[in-house]
Image: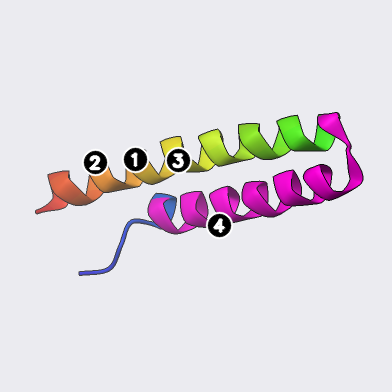
Amino acid sequence: MAMDKDRVKGAATRTGGKMKQAAGDLTGDTKMQTEGKMDQAKGKAQNAMGSIKDTLKK
């Protein structure tokens, strides 16, 4: 059984957010740090939605 596409997108968004936050940490850019944290939260929520969909498919 394949994973729901929301889980894949959520993981990608979360990883991108971690990278954005790390770049903000290195440069001292608080806006980029905040955007990275928001992207991570969005990715986590999207991943959770995909997990729920996967559970319902079973």
Q: In the displayed structure, would residue 13 be above or below residue 40?
A: below
Q: Which residue is mark 1?
A: 48
The nearer-to-camera label among 2 and 4 is 4
Q: Which residue is mark 3?
A: 44
Residue at 34%, 39% (x, y): give it.
49
Q: Farthest bottom residue?
A: 1
Q: Which secondary structure class fits the magenta region best?
A: helix
Q: Is residue 18 left or right of residue 4?
A: right
Q: Position of residue 2 (x, y in %)?
A: 27, 68
Residue at 64%, 35% (x, y): give it.
37
Q: How many marks?
A: 4
Identified by mark 1, the residue type is Ala
The range drawn in magenta is 7-30
Q: CA distance from mark 3 to mark 2?
A: 12 Å
The numbered dot on residue 12 is 4
> Please, what secondary structure does the residue beneath circle 4 have?
helix
Label 4 CA crowd tier, 10 Å (few <14, some 14–19, many 20+): some
Q: Is residue 5 left or right of residue 30?
A: left
Q: In the displayed structure, would residue 17 be above or below residue 5?
A: above
Q: Are marks 3 and 1 in contact (CB under 8 Å)?
A: yes
